[in-house]
Image: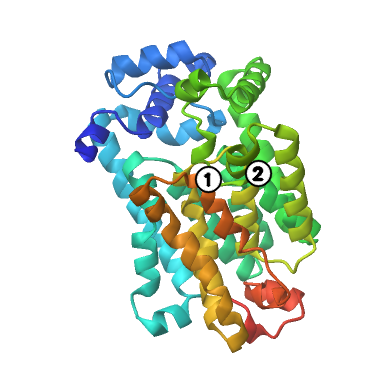
Amino acid sequence: MAFPGAIRGRADFSTLYTAGFMIRSGHASELYDYDTNTEVQEQIIGPSHGPVPFNHLAYETLFFAPFSLLPYRAAYGVFLALNLALLLCSYRVIRVHATHLDGIWHPLSGAVFACFLSVGIALFQGQDSIILLALLTWAYLAADKGHDSRAGFFLGLTFFKFQYCIPIALLYLAWKRWRIFLSFAGTATVAVAVSFLITGLSRLSIYTSYLFSVSTRLGPGEQLKYAIYPLAMPNIFGLLFAVVGNHTVVTITVSCAIIVWAACRPPSFPLAVAVAMLVSYHGLIHDAAILIIPILLFAEAALRGERRRLNRIWVPTAALIYPTIAVSVTLPYCLLALPVLGFLPGPDEKAFALTSRDAQNAGIPASSGL
């Protein structure tokens, strides 16, 4: 069924595997060429559901190049095992801050990880979304312990999906956490430099125009070719696309308003992750795996302390179960943006400054923060 198809190449891992092979075999300058991607993928994997071109910064291919030394099926299995290990690491980081959840039922936080459909999709597809989640949880842990430079470093490593880390970094800049932002900026700069050392500086304009084309040309042919389906994007772009169509100015305006609004709230890493998911111009359901962070930590905050916060438990609950509902009754994933909007703090926003250090910065007693 689905898994046999994945190990034959009908999974997103085929894109990452092909990109790693192209770098290792001397085709770095053609990394963003659709026809070359198609040819190489068919040679090393075989005909599949259709090639999806690699569209991340090239430094990420250094991680996947060793996988291309293995046959595709073996590489898929090894990467699946690695993703499971990273998922376990992320769980161990976050569950320490979910004591009230696990007090209700000891395996509850683990069940959230296991049952969130976006996590399952990322694992099955062999996506790099679990790597993104792990790096963000390590950044959260570092920020919580006051190691801001380390937090910025981990955040900068996620620049292969810059649509998420840039909004988070901008919020920490607005929150005057200078070391996080500067460390992020330095790490991201190195990532960009390494990327164009790999592909050649002349690829910069090609890569930029490529990103622009796949983000603005959203006719049926382009959606199929680049596997970009706005109605499947659980963000503001997908939500507005469903309502008003492809209006870039409207999307940018609403997204900027959300960032500005969040910048005026007390600093909170889970809030920043939720905002990043909302304002990411390009994001698919497997990337929503990063919502595990606000889902668990906002649920923990809702269960902690005053009874008046219990009315906020619907927000993480809805975000957790909506992807499963969407699959069950054929609803678009873009509607996941609605419960994610509920993560934006209300009148009691100080209750949701969710790291111990952020709680101190917001003037909240340490026992109120996660």
Residue at the limit of the structure toward the bottom, as seen here: 306
Q: Residues within 10 Å of mark 2 (few under 14, many from 20)?
A: many
Mark 2: which amino acid?
A: Thr
Please report the residue visible at 72 percent of the width from the left and 78 percent of the height from the top: 360
The x and y percentages for residue 355 are: 62, 72
Tell me the quarter of the picture where residue 19 sits. top left
Identify the residue under disc 1.
334
Identify the residue under disc 2.
187
User: On the rendered image, what quadrant is the C terminus found in?
Assistant: bottom right
Q: Is residue 131 found left or right of 248 in the rendered image?
A: left
Is residue 66 visible to the viewer in this orientation of the structure? yes
Q: Is residue 210 found left or right of 47 in the rendered image?
A: right
Please report the residue visible at 37 percent of the width from the left and 74 percent of the height from the top: 108
Pointer 2 with pointer 1, Cβ within 8 A: no
* Relative to 353, residue 25 above or below: above
The x and y percentages for residue 93 are: 47, 67
Indicate the secondary structure of the residue bearing disc 2.
Answer: helix
